[in-house]
Image (cartoon, helix red, strand yellow):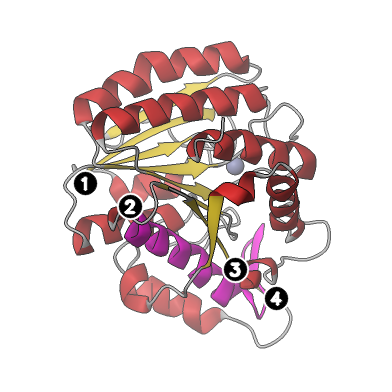
Amino acid sequence: MLSAFITHPDCARHEMGPHHPECPERLGAINDHLLVKGLLDYMHTFEAPLATEEQLGRAHSALYVREIMAAAPKAGYHLVDPDTSMNPFTLNAARRAAGAAIQATDLVLSGEVPTAFCSVRPPGHHAEHAAAMGFCFFNNVAVGIRHALDVHGLKRVALIDFDVHHGNGSEDIFKGDERVLMCSIFEKGLYPFSGEEVKGLNMVNVGLPSRSGGDKFREAVRDYWLPALDAFRPELIYVSAGFDAHREDDMGNLGLVEADYEWVTRQLMAVANRHCHGRIISCLEGGYVLSPLARSVAAHVKVLIGAD
Ligand SMILES: [Zn+2]
């Protein structure tokens, strides 16, 4: 059965000015590399729908959703935080990025596809219940997860986050929501300087020191994530897939390589096969140097679609 590759041209029309690392070219680099590697042959490509106000409101406050919708500029940029701004196309890009997670949820839960990769931007995991920050406006995976819980009626969903930065937004939205188990590994001392304080019993946050490397990363997955996931028995697994922990990416210093992304995806597939019929939905988060980003996504997707 083919997997889903969900994206939309609107996602490349959002940009935050010249030299901004979260640039439209990221999606083109990923698409080109998956094509060259033959991986898109294993995937159905879907154009992401626009998430509705109601769907966004399951993860964000209604007031916040309305504020972002009203803040979209007709021309130029509207600054949301020092690193994050909206151009005239940002709102649709952000609604498509969240819409991709919704569509992925519907496709996977209907049994049409076993797994899905959402190649979308803006990313989402720094967006809180009522705040945009860190290049993020709507928390894409969180919107997808609440759709799975509140619309499809799932009882237990896992969220895995291996971006080099802590997913403060996802933590803010899901802390205390016992239907969700969030497992993250991030680099200590980096933006957004959160993740070390325990915010809820459903959070498994592991901060690693700079230059930990792949061995320490894998040890943390084995020691913390896998036992928690097996005890939780998720019905569906979402991944906040950021690739900025790669050693060629200057956003962080964890020193991972493609083989680490392939390995962690293999562990997650094994968990998914044990507990939830292999169902995984992965959404792009960070990863800013084009070549290692594209290579890492390919290593991740190859396992996700069973082409390895
Ligand atoms: Zn990041």
Image quarter for ligand 1 equals: top right
Give the mark nearer the N terminus: 4 vs 1: 4
Residue placed under numbered mark 3 in the picture: 8
Instruction: Give the percent coordinates (x, y) of residue 289.
Output: 77, 42
Residue placed under numbered mark 1 in the picture: 177
- Disc 2 marks a residue whose amino acid type is Ile
Q: Tell me: 158 left or right of 280.
A: left
- Disc 4 marks a residue whose amino acid type is Tyr
The residue at the point 52 percent across, 63 percent down is 97
Q: What distance separates the C-alpha of mark 3 from that of mark 2?
A: 26 Å
Please tell me whether residue 42 is drawn above or below residue 245 in the rendered image.
Answer: below
Q: Which mark is residue 77?
A: 4
Marks 3 and 1 close (CB-CB < 8 Å)? no
- From which residue to which does the magenta span run? 80-108
Q: Confirm whether the magenta stretch covers residue 12.
A: no
Residue farthest to the bottom, as pictured: 74
- Disc 3 marks a residue whose amino acid type is His
Instruction: Give the percent coordinates (x, y) of residue 98.
Output: 45, 64
